[in-house]
Amino acid sequence: MWPALAKITLSLRITGVRGDGFHWLDAEMVTIDLADELWISAGDSLTVVAAPTAARVPTGSDNLVARALAAVGRRAAVRLVKRIPAGAGLGGGSADAAAILRWAGVSDLEMAARLGSDVPFCLVGGRARVAGIGEVLEPLPFQERMFTLLTPPFGVSTPAVYRMWDAMGGPRADGPNDLEPAALAVEPRLAQWRDRLGDLSGQTPVLAGSGSTWFVEGVFEGPDLVVTRTDRP
């Protein structure tokens, strides 16, 4: 079994846009103990067993597991037990792709970045400053921290959020995540979930990546809340 651990983006600044449309990042990411499982054997298939919160996972050639297998030129029968919510900003698909790269013995961060900007970090894990388009990693000392997550029953399209960020003129957020204003513009329902977690915790929630998950530091109890801790690579 190959675990695929989720990540939280603690801070995200967008520092520029490349000529090809990809965005330059300056972020801090940490691995958390919420994880998918990949059971890999001989064959050529992908089966997804998804929890209700992860039921929106594609199973065709656009699944990041299939794309990662194609990138490394390998075939396998993969049974993906999906626990990380899809479209939630927790790097679920990227973590799955990174698990395939590890299984194939691939550690090339440039190759990982071609699959997605979160895949290089998910390949390395732990805690790191992330730059470039995701392929430049500066490891940071491990810190044991607890977070409470609230994921709405809908996902948010990462490409749509970046397009909105561009259309809005590249706003700098008041909080630690520059994508938050664009995500709220793409999916206004996010605001009510932010306020719900804020009321429960007494803190100002932070959007995980491009959304849809909101998180606060610490342990809080309530409906639909998930408590996680940082995990070592």
Image: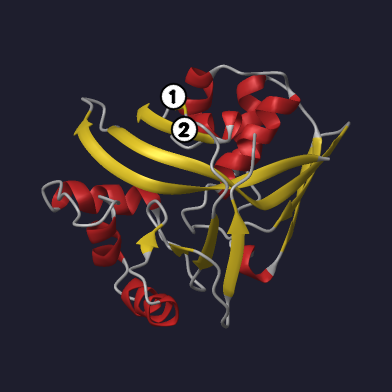
Does any portion of residue 133 appear in the rendered image? no
Does residue 26 appear left or right of residue 181 in this picture? Answer: right
Does any portion of residue 3 appear in the rendered image? yes
**Do the residues under discs 1 and 2 have CB atoms within 8 angstroms?**
yes
Q: Residue at x 21, y 34 (%)?
A: 15
Does residue 30 appear left or right of residue 81 in this picture? Answer: left
Q: Residue at x 43, y 34 (%)?
A: 117
User: Camera-side residue: 102 or 175?
Assistant: 175
Q: Amino acid at mark 1?
A: Glu
Residue 128, numbered label:
2
Does residue 130 appear left or right of residue 229 in this picture? Answer: left
User: Camera-side residue: 73 or 207?
Assistant: 207
Mark 1 to mark 2 CA distance (whole Å): 5 Å
Q: Residues within 10 Å of mark 2 (few under 14, many from 20)?
A: many
Q: Residue at x 31, y 75 (%)?
A: 191
Q: Amino acid at mark 2?
A: Ala
Q: Residue 46: percent from the left, percent from the top?
A: 75, 44
Q: How many marks?
A: 2
> What residue is pinned by disc 1?
138
